[in-house]
Amino acid sequence: MKTYQQILTIAAIAFTSATSFAGYDEFNCVTNGSIERAHLQCVACGISKYYSDKGIEVTPSHKWLALLGLKVREQNLDSRSKGTVTSSDALENFQKDVIIKIQEYGFCAEYLGKDTKKKGRSNNMHDMSAEDWTAFFEFLNRDDNPSSKNYDKMAENLGFKSTSLIGSGGAKKNMDYLFEGFDENLSLDDKRALFKEKLKQALASEYNVSGERAEKTKEFISSGDKDQGLRTCLSDIKQRFFQQQMSDKETFKMCEVIANACDLERTPMSANDFCVHKGMGLRPASSVGSGGRVPLAPPPGPRQKQGQGAK
């Protein structure tokens, strides 16, 4: 017969297990305290869950998710502050916007640079070291906006090219270039076509077939191993999501699974469902343009500020 203490211990273990995997359907994934603190653990686990349901083992790059989080932090997440996750509304908007960016840009499995390799890390840290996360937290969790100098340094450490002739500088503009131009009024296909062009520029060969240095439309990624694994990541994204574009149905389903992992409330198949994008239909996504697509639902409306009917 079990003692009272044994019963309490078993209950505690059961409670810990249930709460640790809340929203993941008790699905285990590669995670750690740092990605949890960055509010991105459920996003990473949701992606892994979506592919696991298909019998495919996938661990998304934690660094790529952190980079997307960094870009989302530049937006107004609620009426009180720019980007700081200081309220439940801001947290919900932060995770929703990261998921939306995954639908638009995709993700890579590894974004591992020479500096991270030198520092060493455990398996659950995946492609980031503790030092990498410390640097990201200066941008993800602070109330004040980082200086342009610190932002340039971060962007350069992420593999974006510095345009300054003396020291570092301009790397933040090159980081912005990769993601700029994605107007909310564009359809999902058009956003992907734009990002595909950015990938083409980023991955263009430095030399032509004659062995001569090729002229590039835009150079915004650092050369050689100074790219910190960014080219490898972008090449993986191109192969995973742009060689054969993910259908609208699967794009929608992936969003549903990630949203469930993050316990995010949705109004399925409505104008306010953040998983739905302009021009999205249930037929396979077209390779160019929006080609006579049947809309699944109207695009989501503008985010409401607190005090104006927001959740």
Image: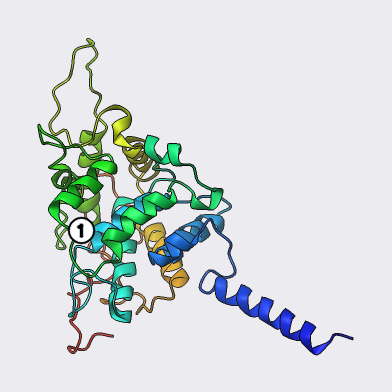
Looking at the image, which is closer to me, 38 or 131? 131
Disc 1 target residue? 187
Q: Residues within 10 Å of mark 1 (few under 14, many from 20)?
A: some
Q: Give the residue drawn at x 34%, y 74%.
A: 269
Query: Where does the C terminus fall, quadrant-wise?
Result: bottom left
Q: Give the residue drawn at x 15%, y 56%.
A: 147
Q: Give the residue drawn at x 51%, y 58%.
A: 31
Image position of 83 with respect to 289: above or below = below
Q: Disc 1 on helix, strand or loop?
A: loop
- Residue 231 position, x and y percent, is 32, 35
Q: Give the residue drawn at x 26%, y 67%.
A: 142
Which of the 4 image quarters holds residue 167? top left
- Residue 102 position, x and y percent, is 33, 56
- Residue 111 position, x and y percent, is 39, 43
Looking at the image, which is closer to me, 208 or 296? 208
Looking at the image, which is closer to me, 213 or 302? 213
